[in-house]
Amino acid sequence: MKSQATMICCLMLFLATDSSHYRSKIHIKVGDKFQNSEGKPKTGRTQEKCQGPCISPSNCSQPCAKHFRGEIGFTCNKKQWQKSTETCTSLSVETLFKDSNGASRLSVASAWIPLHVLDFRSPDPIKSVAQGIRKHCPIDYACIIDVVKSSETTSGNIAFIVQLLKNISTDLSDNVTQEKMKSYSEVANHILHPAAISNWAFIPDKNASSDLLQSVNLFARQLHIHNESENIVDELFIQTKGFHLNHDTSEKSFSFSMSMKNATEGILGMVEIPRQELWELQPNASQAIGIAFPTLGAILKEAHLQNVSLPRPINGLVLSVALPERLKEIVLTFEKINKSRNARAQCVGWHSRKRRWDEKACATTLDVKNKVKCRCNYTNVVMSFSILMSPKSVTDKILDYVTCIGLSVSILSLVLCLLIEATVWSRVVVTEISYMRHVCIVNIVVSLLTANVWFIIGSNFNVKAQDYNWCVAVTFFSHFFYLSLFFWMLFKALLIIYGILVIFHRMMKSRMMVIGFAIGYGCPLVIAVTTVAITEPEKGYVRPDACWLNWDNTKALLAFTIPALVIVAVNLIVVLVVAVNTQRPSIGSSKSQDVAIIMRISKNVAILTPLLGLTWGFGIATLIEGTSLTFHIIFAVLNAFQGFFILLFGTISDHKIRDALRMRMSSLKGKSRAAENASLSPTNGSKLMNR
């Protein structure tokens, strides 16, 4: 009896020592760093072997840190070593189940079972994940969760966990319960954390991300739902929902709301099964399962496809569905992550065999600022869907070409307009009215020319932290000079009223100039400065996607559109007043000359005002969600060619300017002929001979 007690004590000591030894070997602290045997944190820094300058194309590798197996690969790029691959892993089939083995052996010893029953031999080695799970936790797979969740998300560990999930979905998917699905999702959630995303890039197997998606989809297809509607998994980076279906069921839908990195609110997604599709089901009950991934889109690698530039960024949740075979069509609604107006969407489905997004699987039925609605075809190889940030379409390129060509023509036209004004200035500024008219034309041209230059500068800026202050400055000057264009048009209209209604008293030219510059530049300056002062403290002055006035958050764009459209309305009223008062008798020849000038100004205003009004009227229309592409094209054409319109209708169409230009050209020709004749005269010839 004494010897039996001694042997049992020895056995317990052996087991305790063995268990303690094991824990010291694989103990993993939850967090970003591991602890080595001395308690010092593992840094995992690269060794001297792959540091310093290098010669392209060279490769280098070095072993992983302590307690990790594998190696880190480096490639020489621009004479510097850059990390390219990593296979460092602390996980293995043995480590997954070693705690379970130790716990089982200790529990056997502590039960005081007679010695002849105890087996002192080591347990049979576990050769596969399926074998280990069947042995230790066949009901819920819970025995692997703690080891996986406490492991560091190195590239090697991520690859191991992907293979682990793949093996489970292949070998253990015969009877998937909700408990198994929850454990499976907890393991997947660990490697879908935003902190792990950067390490996916160093996994040598570029199909790892698509393997993960396919494994989750295959495993979910085998899930059995018991209740009518269930929230099965609610992890941070993977959600699963399901419900029962039959041919009498009304339209069904899943709704998901999941947090994204750096997002304060959840991103929404919805899967709808149309009523007409449900009619195709058989009378016996079926089930539908939906899975949502907020971070998977950032790591999903597409297989190379000719004529397609990769990567193509995902702009919403990745939504997977497992449906009865008879269901072929579903409707999906995605909330956009990037909600800028330039973020156009393309509905796609993930083709599991081709390992890429397939545009033919879906059609976009709605694309507005916040959300996209897609109608997609569901098959056994296309079970996952999302929206891509669509590259610039043909229509975008057309708008770019129109804007580029229009701005070039506009700038050349404005420069030509200034040259013409400088050429004919002395011949056309006869009276105060005509003088101020041409002052208006010159300042309108200068304002639009400067605004176009700032627009070109702004189009080359990205609204990033380092460019933000510059973007604010560019937006301010663009706003100011575009407003100046309209306020000088307003002063032109006031000049018409002054010329028609004020008969006996004439204002001094200097006073008219002061009033003109106060209206033309003073009012725009006040509006532009006030807009910045009100909206910029909340970072609401410029748009998130372009250097121009914000609309979505602060409606700062109203500080341009309201004054511009009010001026357009005032100018049109002035044109009507001119039409009524043109029959009034003039007093004296000078007044008759002023009336003729006023009529020319009125015609100019009557043509340019509707053009400017239409331009920015279409500009406002483009701000409305779902606006037709036609409005965008018309606005691009009118806006880009404003300088050409001013040259055509503000300068060339004026017969006085044409006459003055013709006389100036004749005078230059006459002078050149006189100089030529003088050089050929006999007097000049004799002088040359005398020299």
Image (cartoon, helix red, strand yellow):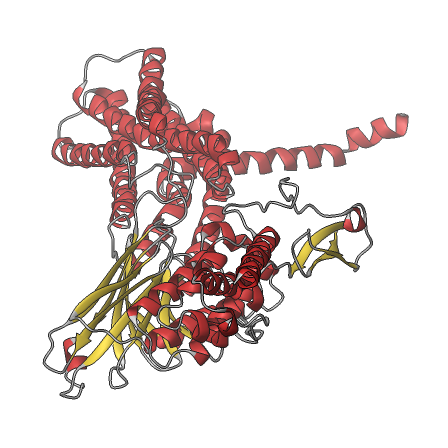
Q: Position of residue 433 (x, y in %)?
A: 31, 22
Res 11 → quadrant: bottom right
Nearest to the observer: residue 356 or residue 516: 356
Q: Position of residue 624 (x, y in %)?
A: 24, 50
Residue at 52% in and 62% down? 102
Nearest to the observer: residue 436 or residue 613: 613
Residue placed farthest to the bottom in the image?
282
Q: Position of residue 172 (x, y in %)?
A: 42, 78
Regarding residue 277, the answer to whether it shows in the image is: yes
Q: Quadrant of the C terminus?
A: top right
Residue at 47% in and 30% down? 469
In the image: residue 499, left or right of residue 295: left
Nearest to the observer: residue 2 or residue 575: 2
Nearest to the observer: residue 23 or residue 460: 23
* Residue 257 sits above or below residue 178 on the image: above
* Residue 157 sits above or below residue 248 on the image: above
* Residue 537 sits above or below residue 182 on the image: above
Q: Position of residue 218 (x, y in %)?
A: 39, 77
Regarding residue 389, the answer to whether it shows in the image is: no
